[in-house]
Amino acid sequence: MKRGEKDPLLRRIVSGVLVAVIPAMLAYVVSFVDGRRREELTYVKGQMEKLYGPLYALTQASDVAWDQFVGRLARRQGPLFFRPDATSDNRTSR
């Protein structure tokens, strides 16, 4: 072998190691980033459930209460809104 030449066996070994190590490192980095992203998404999902879960329940309860209120009042007095006699109140008689 001449002085400036590299050993072809060493070149093959180095290229084989690089072919094995570089994809493994890339897989580790991708796995790490994906794990962090999943943790963040889990945290945000928990925060949304803590906020919007009770908010949804409150909205549903309000809707039921309003429907019952309107139903009872409408049976007693007829239509609630836009009645001709509902426009005259005490402020206009002053």
Image (cartoon, rainbow, N blue to C red):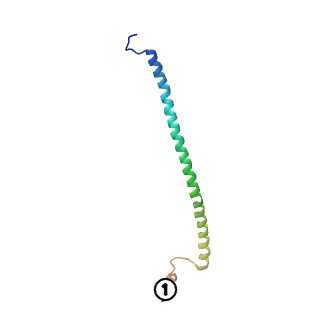
Q: Is residue 46 left or right of residue 3?
A: right
Which picture quadrant has residue 71? Answer: bottom right
From the viewer's perspective, is residue 63 above or below residue 28?
Answer: below
Quick one: SS at disc 1? Answer: helix
- For the residue pair 75 and 92, the one nearer the viewer reads as 92
Q: Amino acid at mark 1?
A: Arg
Q: Give the residue displayed 59% in from the left and 56% down from the top.
A: 50
- For the residue pair 29 and 71, the one nearer the viewer reads as 29
Q: Position of residue 6 (x, y in %)?
A: 41, 16
From the viewer's perspective, is residue 32 above or below residue 19?
Answer: below
Which picture quadrant has residue 8? Answer: top left
What residue sits right under mark 1 in the picture? 91
Q: Position of residue 24 (x, y in %)?
A: 51, 30
- For the residue pair 15 and 53, the one nearer the viewer reads as 15
Q: Quadrant of the N terminus?
A: top left
Badge 1: residue crowd in 10 Å (few <14, some 14–19, many ≥20) = few
Q: Give the residue displayed 60% in from the left and 73% down from the top.
A: 69
- For the residue pair 2 and 69, the one nearer the viewer reads as 2
Q: Is residue 72 left or right of residue 2?
A: right
From the viewer's perspective, is residue 69 above or below residue 16?
Answer: below
Question: So how many labels did they put on this image?
Answer: 1
Residue at the farthest bottom position: 94
Residue at the farthest front position: 3
Q: Give the residue displayed 49% in from the left and 30% down from the top.
A: 23
Q: Position of residue 66 (x, y in %)?
A: 59, 70
Q: Give the residue displayed 49% in from the left and 23% down from the top.
A: 17
Q: Position of residue 25 (x, y in %)?
A: 50, 31
